[in-house]
């Protein structure tokens, strides 16, 4: 509980610092990317709130340790599929973290700068749907990263690569909409956009609802499918040593 | 003391270099992590030519001037913020009974040489920005002074962070807001922040003396907040004051530490 509050505090401080950068940019370029100044500040605090539930800095899953220690063999013989089991755990964790680490930065943002709420119940519902799908996409990605330990032994390299991809190409550090030219088009099509940029746009009502949700669902299906293939692959790779 | 530090750091470096592929891969990847901060600045300036009255080159100068001391401290002392983990694991006791200072051992514990890539990246940006800006050569003497000031300020911050964790054993992440937050803050001209925040980081936690006040002197610009000219040169006064405070806090932390017992 204290650890979660400490995290919420740090997320809030970084939210304030990032907000000033966006404010300076939007003062220089009012209406940039279709956001007004309040939208830009709101964007900043909603994305800060998504760090913990989406585990953008990596981790969250206990799988790499279990693979290294060999406990994964036990998980694979359980009468429940490994991927669904882990997804269920991760969704519960994300819901808890959104409440204790996500809401405080938004409250701080509202108190310091003033942020907008979703306009109407429809927009709120669209955000919630986008949030759930974003958690699934984020899980799908992190599950693949976690299983890579099976082949790589040392997972630090992949973890750092994942950190760069999911902080920069998700829209956490800056809205993907202001990325220049081809870089912007590429970033908007990649799965990381489905974790932060898309749910935040749904919150702001800045993107059409159904295509956004379809985009997230597409990446959720692709990543979960790859995850299922990887689970089958490790089933063949795991060798139980015993005595 | 310096010899002990480098002996311990060298031991960890040899351990890390035992896996050369992993070592170089991590060096390159740590560079990539640092480069995202730089990429953010470049994307911002792909959308505008000036941020709060500062040009791209000027912001990159401030970024480099803050990042050089920060990344050096990140390399050499940032592991001080693992105090709470050592307390929880019970490993702090081993540091305290060894014949070397606890601060020294904690600073070198798990020394990560691959972070050196970030130092190089910061230095390259700083040199590039100095070359790209048409600066008064008579003011460049400030560069080594501000780097040294920044080193003392960030080292003090990490020491304070470690000291605070003696009390915040269950909430170690709070200190990240001040250490990594301090770097995030100083990457940009302080002109973008609110007046009260800037007062706080000038007169309470002297982050403004890492690169902002001396940087204004090097750039030959007046402070948008209107502080007098002599403030540009107060870094070498503010940094030792913070260091003294940090040393006292660290002593308090160690003195009041009670082992969990066996």
Image: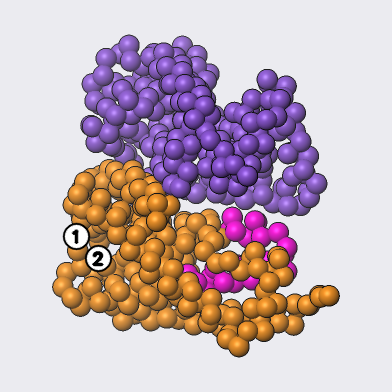
Q: Are marks 1 and 2 on the same chain?
A: yes
Q: Which residues are magenta?
A: A137-161
Closer to viewer: mark 1 or mark 2: 1
Q: Is residue A46 above or below residue A92?
A: above
Q: Quadrant of residue B71?
A: top right
| Chain hosting mark 2 | A
Q: Assess whether residue A138 is covered by the magenta stretch.
A: yes
Q: Are marks 1 and 2 in contact (CB under 8 Å)?
A: yes
The quarter of the rendered structure image containing the N terminus of chain B is top right
Q: Residue A26, which numbered label?
A: none
On the image, numbered disc 1 is attached to which residue?
A116
Q: Assess whether residue B253 is covered by the magenta stretch.
A: no
Residue nearest the observer in this picture, B38 or A67: A67
**Residue at point 56%, 46% (across, down):** B88
Chain drawn purple in the picture: B
Mark 1 → mark 2, Cα distance in angstroms: 8 Å
């Amino acid at each position: 509980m204290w650890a979660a509050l400490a995290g919420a505090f740090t997320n809030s401080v970084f939210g304030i610092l990032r907000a000033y950068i966006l404010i300076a940019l939007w003062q220089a370029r009012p209406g940039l990317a279709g956001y007004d100044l309040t939208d830009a500040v709101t964007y900043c605090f909603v994305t800060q709130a998504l760090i913990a539930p989406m585990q953008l800095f990596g981790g969250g899953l206990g799988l790499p340790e279990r693979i290294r220690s060999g406990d994964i063999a036990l998980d694979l013989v359980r009468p429940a599929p490994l991927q669904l089991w882990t997804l269920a755990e991760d969704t519960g964790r994300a819901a808890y973290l959104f409440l204790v680490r996500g809401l405080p930065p938004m409250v701080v943002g509202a108190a310091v700068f003033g942020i907008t709420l979703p306009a109407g119940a429809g927009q709120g519902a669209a955000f919630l749907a986008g949030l759930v799908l974003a958690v699934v996409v984020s899980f799908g990605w992190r599950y693949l990263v976690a299983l890579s330990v099976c082949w790589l032994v040392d997972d630090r390299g992949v973890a750092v690569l994942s950190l760069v991809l999911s902080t920069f190409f998700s829209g956490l550090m800056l809205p993907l909409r202001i990325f220049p030219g081809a870089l912007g088009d590429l970033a908007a099509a990649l799965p990381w956009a489905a974790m932060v940029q898309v749910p935040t746009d749904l919150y702001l009502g800045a993107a059409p609802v159904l295509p956004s949700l379809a985009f997230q669902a597409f990446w959720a299906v692709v990543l979960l499918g790859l995850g299922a293939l990887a689970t089958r692959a490790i089933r063949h790779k795991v060798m139980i040593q015993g005595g | 003391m310096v010899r002990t530090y480098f002996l311990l750091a060298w031991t960890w470096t040899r351990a890390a270099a035992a896996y050369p592929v992993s070592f170089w891969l991590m060096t390159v990847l740590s560079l990539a992590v640092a480069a995202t901060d730089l990429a953010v600045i470049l994307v911002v300036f792909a959308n505008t030519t000036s941020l709060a009255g500062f040009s791209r080159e000027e912001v990159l100068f401030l970024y480099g001037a803050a990042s050089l001391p920060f990344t050096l401290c990140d390399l050499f002392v940032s592991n001080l913020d693992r105090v709470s983990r050592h307390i929880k694991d019970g490993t702090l006791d081993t540091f305290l009974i060894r014949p070397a200072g606890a601060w020294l051992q904690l600073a070198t514990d798990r020394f990560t040489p691959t972070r050196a890539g970030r130092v190089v990246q910061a230095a390259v940006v700083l040199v590039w920005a100095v070359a790209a800006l048409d600066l008064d050569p008579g003011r460049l003497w400030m560069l080594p002074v501000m780097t040294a000031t920044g080193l003392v300020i960030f080292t003090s911050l990490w020491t304070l962070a470690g000291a605070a964790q003696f009390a915040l054993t269950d909430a170690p992440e709070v200190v990240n807001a001040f250490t990594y937050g301090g770097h995030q803050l100083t990457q940009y001209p302080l002109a973008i922040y609110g007046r009260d925040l800037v007062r706080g980081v000038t007169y309470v936690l002297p982050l403004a003396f890492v690169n902002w006040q001396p940087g204004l002197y090097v750039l030959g610009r007046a402070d948008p907040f209107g502080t007098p000219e002599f403030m540009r040169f107060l870094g070498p006064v503010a940094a030792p004051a913070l260091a003294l405070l940090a040393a006292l806090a660290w002593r308090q932390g160690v003195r009041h530490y009670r082992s969990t017992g066996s």
